Structure formats: structure tokens, C-alpha cells
Image (cartoon, rainbow, N blue to C red):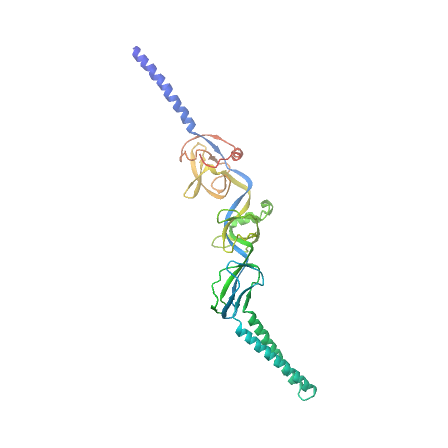
Amino acid sequence: MNKIVMFAGIFGLLYQTSCQPKKEVSEETGKYTVTSPVKIDTSFTNEYVSQIRSVRNIEIRIQERGYLQNIYVDEGQFVKAGQLLFRIMPKIYEAELQKAEAETRVAEIELQNTKTLVDKNIVSKNEQAMAQAKLDQAKAEMALAKLHLSFTEIRAPFDGTIDRIPFKLGSVIDEGGLLTSLSDNSQVFAYYNVSEQEYLDYATNAKGRGSSKVSLLLANHQPLPYKGDVETIESEFNNETGSIAFRAKFPNPDKLLKHGETGKVLMTIPLKNALVIPQKATYEIQDKVYVFVVDNKNIVRSRQLAIRGQMPDLYVVESGISETDKILLDGVQKVKENDKIAYEYEQPGAVISHLRLKAE
């Protein structure tokens, strides 16, 4: 009998020492922090892939067929407005000009002689008018010859940088042949497309956005040290993409940016009553963002979100949840769909004030 009592006592002791800690661990692993989305007036910075264009970029083409006699510049060289770039062999056009000048002198002499005869009433005034017309025609031919001769000298229309030169000395180039391109990179344009919703947020909140300044992130992920200005917005939306083109101008005093380069424009979009949640409360599956919403029975249910934008540690939510929902803040990687949890509620303002980047 004593053995039975002793066995029962040992069993009871073992039961107390083994079961009690298990209950404590269950409470610790099953209790999480929960919060809610919150609406705030804020702004976020969006990245837009952009195409860089020189403020002036032109093709320099030959206007008269001929031999390329001289090349005075090199590829990549900076040139000044009016600087001589190429010369097309001018001999034919020089001869044409000399011929036109000679014909003009003959016409002048004929006109003078006719005037003398008119003064002596030997010929009529009509003869003088004909001589004057011949002189005018000769002068026109001379002006045209000078113009053709000027086409043999190709000069820079503005300050800029020479692009590739495809032809070599002695090449026969047809009329309209491309000699090179010239780019004025002192300033550059960045063209980028903005969605209709972001356009409306930008256009209707001029006061909220503060300024039209934007930044440019280069292809090596380094920012351009100079801010740009949003200058123009196109007049029509692209029906296929639902976006509209913006144009920003950036100073380029170091000539770092070149025509045809790419980058990302960083533009601040103002938001009124934006619904935000901590990024750490979310998880992703195949590029889709989800949160766990806790229902009135303390059961977690996954909910897909439509994300409008993001800021450091925060997502701006377009749809999927509301201010009244309770969302799981920590333990996102530990719980599963339909788990029942115990939780402590933390006010959204307190959560935002001490955000952590990664889900626990």
C-alpha cells in the first residue's frame, strides 16, 4: 500500500514539473503583436525609367554630292558654333561661281552700253529694260553659285560634341549623306512615363508637392549631383499603357550625360489620406504582397494587397485592407493560414515610430 502511495506521489510530482513549463512555452510562442493600417498625409518617391536626350541633337548631312576633301574634327571632339568641320571638293562649284561672275560683268557692260544708246535715242527704253533683266538674271545665277559653293564647307550650327564620322577622306558622298551628328549636352532632357493616377496626384496637388524638382539615378546606381525640373507634360495619354510622358531638364555642366543614355527619374508623389502599413507586416509570393488579417475569433487569414507605392519601411496600400482591420505585425513567417493566435494590440502610430525592416 505504501508503495502505491509513493508511486502516486512521484507521478504527481513528475506531472507538475513536466506539464507546467509546456503551458508557458505554448503561451510564448502563440502570442503576437497586432496593429492596424493608418491613414496619413505623406508622399513617396517613385522611380521611372527614362531616356536621356540632348537639348539639341542634329544630323549633319551633305547638301551637294562630292568628294570628302578635308575632315577638320575628330569623333567625340567638342566644337564651337561656326567652326569648320568638313570640306567637300569645291573645284566644280568654284568654276561655276567664276562663270556666273563673268556673266554678271558682261551683263553690266551690256546694260551700260544700252543706257548710252537710249540717251542718244538710238534704241528704245525696252532695250534697256531687257538689258537690266539680263543683269538681274546673271546676279541671281551668281548668288546661286555662291550658295552651292558654301555647301562645300560644313560648319557647326551650335556648340556641341561630334559623334561618329562614318566616311573617310576621299569618299564620294551622295547628296543627303550623313557626315556625323552633333549634340549639345550642356543640358539634357529626361523623358519618362507616369501612370494616370500618379499624374492626377501630381497635377492636382501643386502646393503639397512643394516643387517640381526631380532627381536622376544613373545606370551605375549613382545619383546625378544636380536636380532637374519637370518642364512639360504631354497633352495625351497613351491608350495602350495608360500613361503620359513627362519631360524633365537637368543641368549637365560636367558633360557626364550623353544623348541616348538611360537612367531613372526619382519623382516625389504627394498623397492625401494615404493608407499605410509597415513593410515588415507583409510577405510576398510570386511578386504578390500579402498580410495576415486577424478576425474577431483571433484566427489569421491571408489577404492580398494592391500596393500603390512604398517609402522606407512602409507600403502605401491601394486596396485589400482598411483602417478597421487588424493585421499581424510580427511572426509573419511563423503562423499559417487559419491559425488561432493570442495577441497584443499596438497602436499604429507607436508602430511607425520604431519600425524594423524585416519580418520576424
- Please tell me how many numbered marks the rendered image carries: 0
User: Which one is nearer the viewer's eye here, 69 or 107?
Assistant: 69
Q: Nearer the viewer, residue 358 or 279?
A: 358
Give above or below for 208 relative to 137. Answer: above
Q: Name the spot of residue 201 as percent of width and height, x first.
A: 55, 47
Between 65 and 357, the one nearer to me in the picture: 65
Q: Against 225, is 128 above or below?
A: below
Which corner quadrant of the image does residue 136 belong to? bottom right
Q: Is residue 225 left or right of residue 340?
A: right
The quadrant of the image that shows the N terminus is top left
Residue 266 horizontal/vertical position (percent): 53, 47
Q: In x, y percent, where is residue 178?
A: 49, 65
Residue 41 appears in the figure:
yes
Displayed quadrant of residue 299: top left
318 relative to 83, above or below = above
Residue sitting farthest toward the bottom: 122
Q: Nearer the viewer, residue 330 or 119?
A: 119
Q: Can residue 175 be seen by looking at this rendering?
A: no
Residue at screen point 50% across, 62% down: 180
Image quarter of the C terminus: top left
Place of residue 105 in the rendered image (x, y in percent of width and height, measured from the top left): 62, 79
> What's the residue at 56%, 70% (across, down)?
150
